[in-house]
Amino acid sequence: MTHPLRHLMFALLAAFVAFGGTARAANTVDPQDFVDRASESGIAEVEAGKLAEKKAQHPQVKAFAEMMVKDHTAANAELKQLAATLKLKTADDASLMEQAKAKLLEMRDDSFDKAYAENQVKAHQEAVELYRQAAQSDQAQLRDFAQKILPKLQAHLEKAESLAKELDAKR
């Protein structure tokens, strides 16, 4: 093999390895980043669910809110145990953005149910994407946790979408 051809092959191999590494990194999430984001959103889900249990008018919205409080409380507890095992810190509060959304939601009266359902669709779309990334993690315990929780989040998303459509049709 000629010298320039060898360099070209080496450059192509290096580019392939670099591209593969970059693509992999884009599809996964750093463990601490995952724990931060998952714990913040999990706290927000419980808080929003408790608010909806009080303010919702539609029985299906109340039932959905009860499910959110129950399921996300359990997932938050598991996440806290995982974080402790991995020597990572969980969030103590929802993110500032989630807190702001909760305040806006709290001020709604007649439109509360629809706003809650729409917020749940967006929140669960983001959560599903976050957990999909974590489900590809090289960190086995994180990957296993994400793979365990992901189907429940996908079911929550489907239910939230259905609920939002139903409430939209009642307008």
Image (tube, helix red, strand yellow):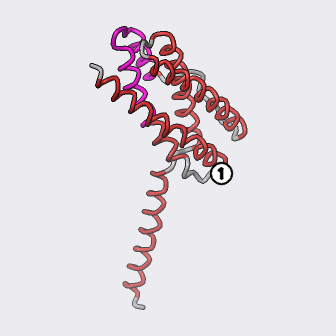
Q: Tell me, yes or no, whether the highlighted magenta stretch contains residue 124.
A: yes
Q: Which residues are magenta?
A: 97-125
Q: Where is residue 87, by image quadrant?
A: top right
Q: Residue furthest right?
A: 85
Residue 29 seen from this side: yes
Q: Which quarter of the rendered picture does the N terminus lie within?
A: bottom left
On screen, 125 above or below 94? Answer: below
- In percent of width and height, residue 112 lies at 38, 14
Up-down: is 91 above or below 150?
above
Left or right for 170, reference 106: left
**Residue 109 location (% of width, % of height):** 37, 8
Camera-side residue of 84 and 120: 120
Residue 43 x %, y %? 56, 24
Q: Is residue 122 visible?
A: no
- The image quadrant where one finds the C terminus is top left
Judged from the image, the secondary structure of the residue bearing numbered disc 1 is helix
Answer left or right for 74 relative to 3.
right
Q: Give above or below for 71 relative to 148.
A: above
Q: Which SS type dominates the magenta stretch?
A: helix
- The percent coordinates of residue 136 (x first, y second) are 54, 52
Quarter of the image for residue 121 reads top left
In front here: 121 or 91? 121
Q: Is residue 166 left or right of residue 152?
A: left
Residue in the image at 52% along x and 42% along y:
131
